[in-house]
Amino acid sequence: MQPGNEPSFRQSVDLMFNRAVALMDLPPGLEEKIRVCNATYKVRFGVRLRGQIETFVGYRSVHSEHMEPVKGGIRFSLGVNQDEVEALAALMTYKCALVEAPFGGSKGGLCVDPGQYDEHEMELITRRFAYELIKRDLINPSQNVPAPDMGTGEREMAWIADQYARMNTTDINARACVTGKPPHAGGIAGRVEATGRGVQYALQEYFRHPEDVAKSGLSGSLDGKRVIVQGLGNVGYHAASFLSAEDGCKITAIIERDGALVDERGLDVEAVHHWIAKHGGVTGYADATHVADGAKVLENDCDILIPAAMEGVINLTNAAKIKASLIIEAANGPVTAGADDVLREKGVVIIPDMFANGGGVTVSYFEWVKNLSHIRFGRMQRRQEEARHQLVVDELERLSASSGTGWTLSPDFKEKYLRGADELELVRSGLDDTMRAAYQSMREVWHSRDDVDDLRVSAYLVAIGRVAASYKAKGL
Ligand code: GLU
């Protein structure tokens, strides 16, 4: 939720859209057609729990159907409201266009605090919400495909998939009605960590371009960079974990609901994650300084700030005090339109949400394709690839032996080279390729146009251009 004196989340997304669209030359009316949310379905339904009927309010919003199915997560949170769901649906349209996932944009939400109910109760609530959406084709493999978001995960997606299958017993593609399912229920390897992995790939790609890195006043590689992560949920945890374990970043602060942990030497992400899972928050964690006013820590000195929790956390009340020179939006909409103006003015580089967190929907796309093709990625090729690599290795060893050079292939090389790619490796490769390609498309706009000086507008220009082209091709 944005602070009182700022535009709402949806208005904030519209303001960002308007800033970009003003630089485009779209046919009259098309701009408005793209901006507006096509439809938002609001449903109230009752579930009998603990001997009495409780009424829940849920939404599924479809922002743009220039491509179908439309795609986007379902959020479970007490903060869910129509404005938020519509803002998130719009961001899904632009995100899918930017990462070239062939979907329109949608989003769903249910006003519920999952912490208040046990597993069985949550299953009843989720299945009932899914029933309401399925019977109106708002969950459907060819029309609308949800996925996890805040407050939901593999468990909820498995219930939704099963609910759809029960209501559509002859649909051979039933499993493709939702993504983010667990592996044994039609999921894909690497989906849980996909958004965090995408944040890592996004940063790796940014740091491949020294001129871009210089724009944020930084230099060198990710190694040794001081990073603050806000929100150690699914996205923040995986991003922090990969960046610290694989890229040499130091996670100097982790901000959670009950305060922040700070340690300039770098926090042990796994230990903190463990602690939160056990104790429900960061309070009491002994190996770091605890700061009760967590939000204040967003203003601490660091190289990279990763807001990975929710919208509006960087707003007009704190934007001017942010010290990070590079912000990567792992959450959707963490920087308000007003804060965006302030930060751009200060020269802060913002890697925008629609790119930075596009890894989730990218791997969802792979899962949907897997479900429709009814076969795991790599199943046909893997052993054939290994056999061909074995041929090369045998031949190199034969040449080495017959020429008497004494060259040998190192065991490490052989081990890596001989192994055919499994599903997880293919998913990572596809995700990395997607993040690089999406960055390149934004970067080209950023560097080639004199009237563009930030990545967000660049991202919108690319995304809106693609959506517009798709509408034009339909004759609109
Ligand atoms: N909820 C995620 C997002 O905001 C994932 C959406 C999806 O996979 O469809 O991008």
Image (tube, helix red, strand yellow):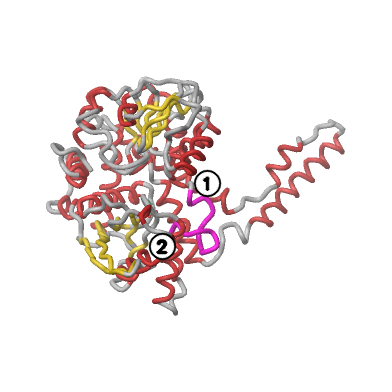
- In reply to whether residue 159 is colored magenta, the answer given is no
Q: Quadrant of the C terminus?
A: bottom left
Q: Check residue 301 in the rendering and tell me which mark sits there, or answer none.
A: none
Q: Amino acid at mark 1?
A: Arg
Residue 461: where, in percent of width, then height? Answer: 26, 42
Q: Nearer the viewer, residue 335 or 123?
A: 123
Residue 437: which quarter of the image?
Answer: top left
- Seen as rendered, the residue at the extreme bottom is 170
Q: Quadrant of the N terminus?
A: top left
- In reply to whether residue 191 is colored magenta, the answer given is yes
Rate crowding at label 1 as few (under 14), some (14 to 19) or many (20 or more) other CA atoms within 10 Å: many
Q: Is mark 2 within 8 Å of ligand 1?
A: no
Is 384 positioned to the left or the right of 93 in the image?
right
Q: Nearer the viewer, residue 472 or 92?
A: 92
- Residue bearing the label numbered 2: 178
Is 153 positioned to the left or the right of 315 in the image?
right
Looking at the image, is mark 2 or mark 1 earlier in the sequence?
2
Vertical comparison of 90 with 18: above or below: below
Is label 2 in contact with label 1 (beta carbons under 8 Å)?
no
Q: Amino acid at mark 2?
A: Val
The local secondary structure at tag 1 comes to helix
Is 189 positioned to the left or the right of 50 in the image?
right
Q: Which contiguous range is marked in magenta?
A: 179-192
Residue depicted at x 46% and y 38%: 239
Vertical comparison of 342 with 63: above or below: above
Residue 322: where, in percent of width, then height? Answer: 29, 25
Rate crowding at label 2 as few (under 14), some (14 to 19) or many (20 or more) other CA atoms within 10 Å: many
Residue depicted at x 81% and y 40%: 397
Residue depicted at x 26% and y 52%: 80
Is 228 positioned to the left or the right of 414 in the image?
left
Q: CA distance from mark 2 to mark 1?
A: 20 Å
- Residue bearing the label numbered 1: 428
